[in-house]
Amino acid sequence: MSQPEVSRVKSPLVPLATLIGREVRNEKVEKPFVKYGQAALAKKGEDYFLIKPDCQRIPGNPSTTFSVFAIFDGHNGISAAVFAKEHLLANVLSAIPQGISRELWLQALPRALVAGFVKTDIEFQQKGETSGTTVTFVVIDGWTVTVASVGDSRCILDTQGGLVSLLTVDHRLEENVEERERVTASGGEVGRLNIFGGNEVGPLRCWPGGLCLSRSIGDTDVGEFIVPIPHVKQVKLSDAGGRLIIASDGVWDALSSDMAAKSCRGLPAELAARLVVKEALRSRGLKDDTTCLVVDIIPSENPVLPLTPMKKKNVLSSLLFGKKYQNSTRKAANKLSAIGVVEELFEEGSAVLAERLGKDFHLNASSGLFRCAVCQVDQPPTDGLSVKSGPFFSPASKPWEGPFLCTNCRKKKDAMEGKRPSRTAVVI
């Protein structure tokens, strides 16, 4: 490789002082207050949550602070929920290039969330345990909110004027037709539980394993068609702010999004979280772990989120995922944007990894190594393949397409797409 080519590929190291100065001079971000509250009632003890309001894009620079809130609803044990709580954030951040501006950081975040979820799932598989977990993972940087989710925990946004929007998609086989089609196309079977006499009962499940969800982290005893690839949505609030309600299905099985928002309007976040859990308990009883985080994003000059009256029939329809559904929600999204409530920046829910990792790839010009887009490990090209390459792809015979995947991550991609037998169930 000639010297000019090397210069184009290899990014020079930027001193920390320069990065901090760039943030201060060039990126004028009016930071809102972020206030939060948490409440939970345990039935099985498999819900976990993460609250980190003091993360920094540039270590040591408070002006680059962002917040992370997440709920992990475990099933078949707690191992997957605990593992995801401890490792997911670091895996996401490792997939974001260092030394980039806030704007580019936010643009890179949706892809990094996909890589982080998949990497966490691969790492957990290596433990040989069979539990699984849903994840609803929220990153707040200024007025920009990015939500990634697998499973049926949920995050809603309550904005001024009583508008409630759903920032996640429920990956339940019972309700999600597209996910049922994807699972069966990848080699899974979808059906209800058969009992004596041939009668079918309960919700639709995926077999083998009997899981009601089509996406999760973990679930080593179920086929690879249960994928960890999250639905990701990124929005920018107006300077009026808003309230996020993040909760496990113990809340959403009892309350609609509108009911949950309405039950706690005008109250401080900590009290609001308690009331949402109390309302869910009053409505349905304690039939499952019930966990709720309430996060208020508040203008710095007005540290209290004002009470807003609820308008009749003024609720944003649940936002479905994928390109096929964008047109059906365009009118509702435009309605929000028109009144200055929220701007939709990004939304994608495809379960195809090649569609989620983009087209570029990272090459270390000095060593000639490619970096895996998922696990971030540097390897020579002969030890991996393009994410878009076919089974007989040869880097020497065809042009490179899409980001590089190491051998292990390539196997994971193929398994999720039904291109090789699912992993063998782990017997304990």
Image (cartoon, rainbow, N blue to C red):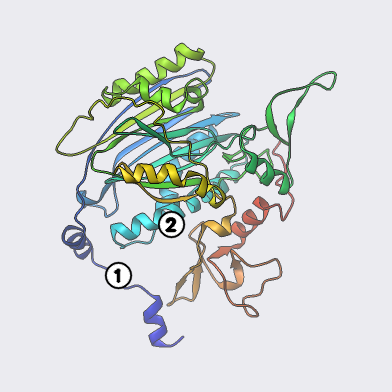
- Residue 147 seen in render: no
19 or 198: nearer the viewer: 198
Which corner quadrant of the image does residue 272 belong to?
Answer: top left
Name the residue nearer the viewer: 349 or 42. Answer: 349
The picture quadrant where one finds residue 190 is: top right
Mark 1 to mark 2 CA distance (whole Å): 17 Å
Vertical comparison of 317 with 404: above or below: above
Q: For the residue carrying disc 1, how many other residues have a C-alpha within 10 Å: few (<14), some (14-19), or many (20+)?
A: few
Can residue 201 be seen in the rendering of this structure? yes
**Amino acid type, label 1:** Leu
Residue 313, compared with residue 33, is above or below; it is: above
User: Residue 46: percent from the left, percent from the top?
Assistant: 51, 26
In the rendered view, does 427 fall on the left or right side of 318? right
Name the quadrant of the C terminus.
top right
Nearer mark to the viewer, of 1 and 2: 2
User: For the residue marked with disc 2, what is the amino acid?
Assistant: Ala
Which residue is tagged 1?
13
Q: Which mark is residue 137?
A: none
Secondary structure at numbered mark 1: loop
Q: Which residue is located at x 47 percent, y 33 percent?
A: 154
Q: Position of residue 95 (x, y in %)?
A: 43, 57
| Mark 2: few/some/many CA within 10 Å (<14, 14-19, 20+) | many
Q: Which residue is mark 2?
A: 95
Give coordinates of residue 233: x percent, y percent. 44, 46
Answer with left or right where residue 129 lies relative to residue 371. Answer: right
SS for dot 2: loop
The total number of labels drawn is 2
Residue placed furthest toward the bottom: 2
Q: Position of residue 179 (x, y in %)?
A: 63, 42
Observer-nearest of 269 and 343: 343
- In which quadrant of the rendered view does residue 167 lie? top left
